[in-house]
Image (cartoon, helix red, strand yellow):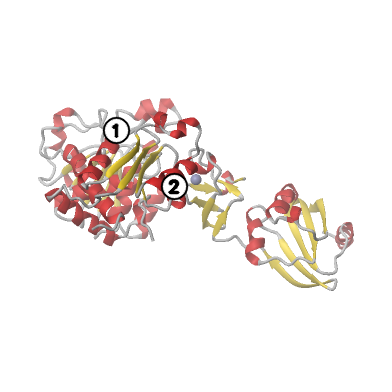
Amino acid sequence: MKKDLISITDFSKTEYLKIMKLAAEFEENPNQDLLKGKVVASLFFEPSTRTRLSFETAISRLGGRIIGFADPDSSSASKGETLHDTIKMVSNYADLIVMRHPLEGAARYAAEISPVPVINAGDGANQHPTQTLLDMYSILKTQGTLDNLNIFMVGDLKYGRTVHSLLMAMSEFENPIFNFIAPTVLEMPEEYKLLLREKGIKYYEHKEFTDIISAADIIYMTRVQKERFSDPIEYEQVKNVYILRNAMLEKTKPNVKILHPLPRVNEIHTDVDANQKAYYFTQARNGVFAREAIISHIMNVK
Amino acid sequence: MQDDQKKKLKLKVSAIKEGTVIDHIPAKNLFKVISILGLDSIENQITFGTNLESHKLGAKAIIKVTDKFFEDDEINKIALIAPHAKLNIIRDYEVVEKKVVEIPDTISGIVKCFNPKCITNNEQITTRFKVVAKDLISLKCKYCEKITNSNQIRMC
Ligand SMILES: [Zn+2]
């Protein structure tokens, strides 16, 4: 049976650990011809240069060839072709489909109708599982473990899909502690807090972005995205609430690392960039190795 | 309800010899029930009454289908729009069995996902849900993974 990666929960803990191990191998030796002779379709129904370049670099380093489109205007979807028909056509040509789509559930649907594996590179506000795996790889690399970590999540915890997926994945490991820092309108949704309670995992909620971060092993910052708000006034009220500045890191633990899915707007002041606790640029680089690992696992070549 | 009223109500729809009587359907959902069960495309004799008095439902409807006996998963499809429906299985003019409908664990079609950004609301796709709560119905979309609550349920 073919493997797809649509939501982070499609993978088991064993698979997470396998991806981590493979990512480390690819970081050691990024160029391996494991996809020689294979064609990978990269279908971006919504433009995302960052994610696309990361995937296409990973595919190229594995020796695969890429077909596809970078934005909807150059795809047949702009001529009114349904997602169904585009996927049916492309799966005749390619051995693997990597896709990003503005509609939620598009990747799950594509996986259902495609005979070749599908990797979700983001479906609207829903899922972006490869981001989560590269976040986990970044955490493992900097902390040496995925167990017993105190993870702070800051900013938009309501609409931020990356924090939800990371929470689900990290809740599979030993004894995590979560701290959520968000304004009331952007609080972590109840369904995720319920999941933590059911697993007996401790979490704390805060409104203030203060000294409490001194307990953190990981500080995961998020961007407050305007397009997620139906009420523009609500957005104006919260967009500048939590900004991380270098001075705030003085009392934090020596091992703490600042993560951010990028691109940032202003939620991390540029004076943080030079601090060795800032990790977001390296985190993005880890994305290529994590994606090489994910693709080789899905294609059964590793 | 008084006994004589009950008697009158029974007389409004004629009795059947063999088949199934589906009672306690909310009147406003009668035609949806007919279409979900595919009763509009079978040859059997069907009689129905609607806008009948019901203390529980306000106005109820009743369907009698001759020579038709439903499988459980067939009839459970109507649970979302007729949760109090009761089935009487009739053999030789006698009620030989009574059944209530049960909300199934998964639902395909019938209901729309409430999320306007869901792929199922933008392309011709049969919706699929996992029923995550049955008392106050809540449905998790297989595609967008969002929850549609009982007060957000709309039919396809
Ligand atoms: Zn949906």
Question: Quarter holding the C terminus of chain B?
Answer: top right
Amino acid type, callout 1: Thr
How many labels, in total? 2
For label 1, the crowd category at 10 Å Cα-Cα, with few meaning under 14, some 14 to 19 and many 20 or more, is few
Residue A76 drawn at (x, y percent) = 45, 34
Q: What chain letter is assigned to the residue under label 1?
A: A
| Numbered tag placed on residue A49 in the rendering | 1
For label 1, the SS is: helix
Residue A50 drawn at (x, y percent) = 27, 35
Residue A132 drawn at (x, y percent) = 28, 47
Q: Badge 2 is on which residue?
A: A110
On whether disc 1 and disc 2 are found on a single subunit, the reply is: yes
The image quadrant of residue A156 is top left
Q: Earlier in the sequence, mark 1 or mark 2?
A: 1
Amino acid type, callout 2: Ala
Vertical arrangement, residue A300 with respect to residue A91, above or below: below
Whether residue A105 is visible to the viewer of this picture, yes or no, is no
Question: Taking B135 as reference, is A277 left or right?
Answer: left
Question: Quarter holding the N terminus of chain B?
Answer: bottom right
Whether residue B32 is visible to the viewer of this picture, yes or no, is yes
For label 2, the crowd category at 10 Å Cα-Cα, with few meaning under 14, some 14 to 19 and many 20 or more, is many
For label 2, the SS is: helix
Instruction: Name the foreground residue: A62 vs A241.
Output: A62
